Amino acid sequence: MVQRPDPTFHASPKLASEAPPEKFAYTLLLSGDFSKPDALAIVDVDPASAQYGKIVHTVTMPNKGDEFHHFGWNACSSALSPLSGHAFIERRYLIIPGLRSSRLYIIDTKPHPTQAKIHKIIEPEEIFHKTGYSRPHTVHCGPDGIYVSTLGGAGPDGTDGPPGIFILDCETFDVLGRWEIDRGPQLLHYDFWWNLPRDYMVSSEWGLPPQFENGIVPEDLLANKYGHHIHFWNLRARRNVQTIDLGANHQMALEVRPAHDPAREYGFLGVVVDTTNLEGSIWTWWREGSEFRIEKTATIPAEPADPELLPPLLKGFGAVPPLVTDIDLSLDDKFLYVACWGTGELRQYDVTEPRKPKLVGSVHAGGIARRTPRPDGTPWAGGPQMLEISRDGKRVYVTNSLYSTWDDQFYPEGVPGALAIVNVNPAGGIAFDKTFHVEVPEGYRTHQVRLEGGDCSTDSFCYSSA
């Protein structure tokens, strides 16, 4: 018998970008009022299909109140690492954390996406017992296991000890334990990613569960008590090697996006809001010798608005902050996409010069004050939120819900689920696909998207593009 690696694994970002286009997208459906179980929807995204833009299968969970947020694959191109013993594992299972329940669902997507089903459920008690962590969040497939970040520590409110990262066995899905050997000053957590050949990890900060589970805490925000550090780690030694404070006014340092080509030692970080002027910002980090550096490289100002159009939380400011809640980087490391969930804008930056991002495209949908409708004229509530880019860089998938209680604070009129595609001009410029319109089931919101065969916030590569 001849064994070959999964054909969706690619040695370099360039080879991945040449793979066939995705035909199915997986998106999380969140019951915002917790009256129904959360679900996974499989959407036909093949323009040649008669089912284009339709939900063709749904996996409904057996529990209520999970609060689906981020999810990921059990395996990806990182399995081709020369240090891996898992080169022949399949990209087959989706790992879906319940951020509120601390439960993990393992979803089998074979033999076909339209037959996806629950393979295993990891109950919260196993995570609590083996790691001391709670509130699982970001999932990344590593060469030696599945890495899951958490936002809470132990105890009922998740504040008994710091949150961190734990490891799942990539074949049995057993919880193995905490990843960190020496966390240094790291006390908060949000996103993480890495440069595998260079052997470093980057992590960011949001807040502890009492600061987000019942909605944003205005007093904590104005007192600059949310996360504002970025941490760099020695990946193999599992220890913190450097922490940089962005300045306490730079509240909620969320998504980290390293360059996909591992020969490039830089990456990007999105910061939600500056409490001195409500602007959002993009930061670029890089390594000089053994030291990491970071600087603010782009800012997005708040937009003045009629207080009558604003929720109680913002009336006193008379302005809408952009609220940079997600960023994503194309596989060729050329375009960085920035979701401004507050103002309802999706921005496209040319980051060919990483420390000089250049705004080259923009579209609007929703927004707290703008309330821009879809291109077909139907309403869009919320703003562009989670982003996912196709491997060929030609399509950006956009959802509109952030987190149930935050949705309710910033968009009190509700955030009915939406999923859109934005088409990309290779020379720069973006526009909504007017032919793609998904009817999301009543009562559900949409969060993150994953694409069949991989996408730009899932795979990490071990070899440079030629």
Image (spheres, grey):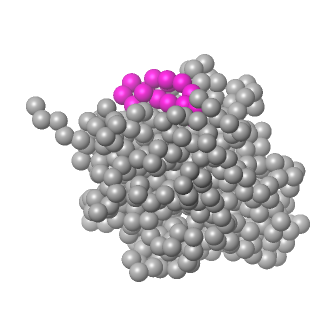
Q: In the displayed structure, does residue 338 sit left or right of residue 43? A: right
Q: In the displayed structure, does residue 443 sit left or right of residue 318? A: left
Q: Quadrant of the C terminus?
A: bottom left
Q: Is residue 58 above or below residue 14?
A: above
In which quadrant of the rendered view does residue 253 lie? bottom right
Residue 89 horizontal/vertical position (percent): 29, 35
Q: Residue furthest left?
A: 1
Q: Is residue 365 magenta?
A: no
Magenta stretch bounds: 165-180
Q: Is residue 130 above or below residue 354?
A: above
Q: What residue appears at the point 38 percent right and 38 percent down from the top-left corner?
A: 143
Q: Nearer the viewer, residue 38 or 359?
A: 359
Q: Nearer the viewer, residue 386 or 415?
A: 386
Q: In the displayed structure, does residue 432 sit left or right of residue 17? A: right
Q: What residue appears at the point 39 percent right and 77 percent down from the top-left corner?
A: 426
Q: Is residue 114 visible?
A: no
Q: What residue appears at the point 62 percent right and 74 percent down from the top-left corner?
A: 372
Residue 321 horizontal/vertical position (percent): 74, 67
Residue 274 horizontal/vertical position (percent): 77, 63
Q: What residue appears at the point 81 percent right and 69 percent down from the top-left corner?
A: 277
Q: Nearer the viewer, residue 62 or 393?
A: 393
Q: Quadrant of the N terminus?
A: top left
Q: Residue furthest front?
A: 289
Q: Is residue 140 visible?
A: yes
Residue 182 horizontal/vertical position (percent): 62, 32
